[in-house]
Image (cartoon, rainbow, N blue to C red):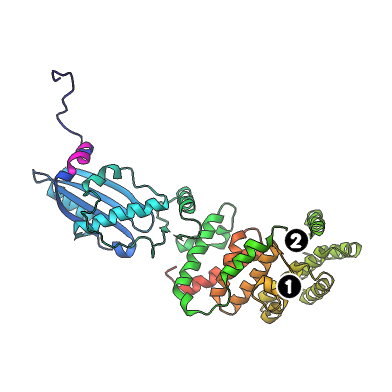
Amino acid sequence: MAKSGKVVQLFQKPENFIKTRARELKLGNCYISYDWEASGIANILVSRIHTNGNFTLGIYLVDLLCLGIKDTTFKFNVGIEEMNYFIELVNADEVEYNMVHNILYGAEAFANDCGFKAHKDWAITQYLLEEDNDDIPLIEIDFGEDGIPAYYVGPNDNPAKIKQILATLDKNVGAGNYLFYIDENEFEDDEIIEDGNEQSFKQIYYTFTGAYRDKFGENEAYTLDKNHIAEIWDQKVDLGLYSLNDELDDRIIGCAEEYESIFEDKSLESISQIHALLIKNPHMPLFYAELFLQYKMIGLHGKADAIAKKGMQLFPDFLYLRFYAAHAAMVDGELEKGLKLLNKKYNLDEAFPQRTAFAEGEFMLFYAALCKYFMANDNLIDAITCSDALIVEIYKYACSENAILDLLSLIKAKLGEVY
């Protein structure tokens, strides 16, 4: 003990030395993995030279696309042989210090804007770098993909980690404002359309449609105005399930609940039962819609068309039946017939100008039918504009789900093997 009673510390811990004195050491050579620009992932090694000729190394794993400094560590006071071992491990080329400085601090800042903090040991290893101030010349480095955060699922990213990363991106940059890439083998219809996977599916959707727009958008003609469609949704869509008439809506909802088992049966017996119900209650438009769907389901297309025609005559403002028929026509390849049922218009408010508002389901059915129409005409840009509206409620309406899955299959084929 010293006379003052304080403990005399003869040897300083490496962490404390790095934090307090590393910047006094001479900068040595710096290295970066040779493929960092193509991959968006950089392994970086920065060396400081001790007066005894040994080196202290800062080693960094950096994701320039989204996550920033994913891992970092240091090696304190090592010899030249050990240093060469780590250079070889990094698989790197020598590079000037200013480049790695801009990459490290730039990636850390970009990731922070996305909601991600640097690895905990960055609190130590950042002191192996020069202070981040105006003395360091600014080098323009691209972060993200064209400035857009891009998360590539890594081989060690488990479902919980993926969910956490996506939630962080949603909170900080907003859904649809970043790119999300997973292994193509994970893109299976029977896996992504499950409870709990909605967010992952939406990111798959935004990734594929965004890539298609980037690759083909400027070369394809389009007719739809996505801002106008958004305006219809935001300003005119009522959340009623079946109609805009409260009294009729209540009756339809009650009918749907009471006869749910019959509607789900989809057989000749259920058709017979619905006919009997229609005779007793000829003022219920839902029975016409259900009969149409059940006739189509079992392949009686002529009877389906007949019941649809009669129902549309009796209930011209019950647009669900018209849109069911239009959607079915598009699926069957009867494009002009389907478009005629949509009054040959591409916007819901223009097709039915007598209406001042539309139910949510009417909106979805209209643009699902239109999406099928554009797909059949190989106009995927307009189909994507429709599907951008449908993705809002992907799991609520079967027509939305089916249209988007079909569209994604076409997009994957167009993009090629890279996706």
Q: Which residue is rendered at x = 89% and y = 62% of the image?
A: 281
Image spot of residue 124 (x, y percent): 26, 42
Q: Looking at the picture, how far across and down is residue 38, in whole percent?
A: 32, 65
Determine if the magenta segment contains residue 21: yes
Q: Is disc 2 placed on a helix, strand or loop?
A: loop
What residue did someone put label 2 on?
Answer: 242
- 2 or 1: mark nearer the eye: 2
Residue closest to the eye, 364 or 265:
364
Label 1: which secondary element: helix
Q: How many marks?
A: 2
> Quarter holding the C terminus?
bottom left
Where residue 41 appears, x then y in whole percent? 32, 58
Q: Which residue is mark 1?
A: 325
Q: Which span of residues is magenta-colored?
A: 16-22
Determine whether 85 is above or below 345 in the image: above
Q: Is residue 104 magenta?
A: no
Image quadrant of residue 317? bottom right
Tell me the kind of residue under disc 2. Answer: Tyr
Disc 1 residue type?
Answer: Ala
Q: Quadrant of residue 332?
A: bottom right
Q: Is residue 406 visible?
A: no
Would you say 195 lies left or right of 180 here? right
- For image coordinates 25% across by 50% down, the residue present is 132
Local packing at callout 1 (Cα closer than 10 Å; few below 14, some 14-19, many 20+) is many
Residue 245 is tagged as none
The answer to whether 294 appears left or right of 283 in the picture is: left
Q: Quadrant of the N terminus?
A: top left
Q: Are marks 2 and 1 in contact (CB under 8 Å)?
A: no
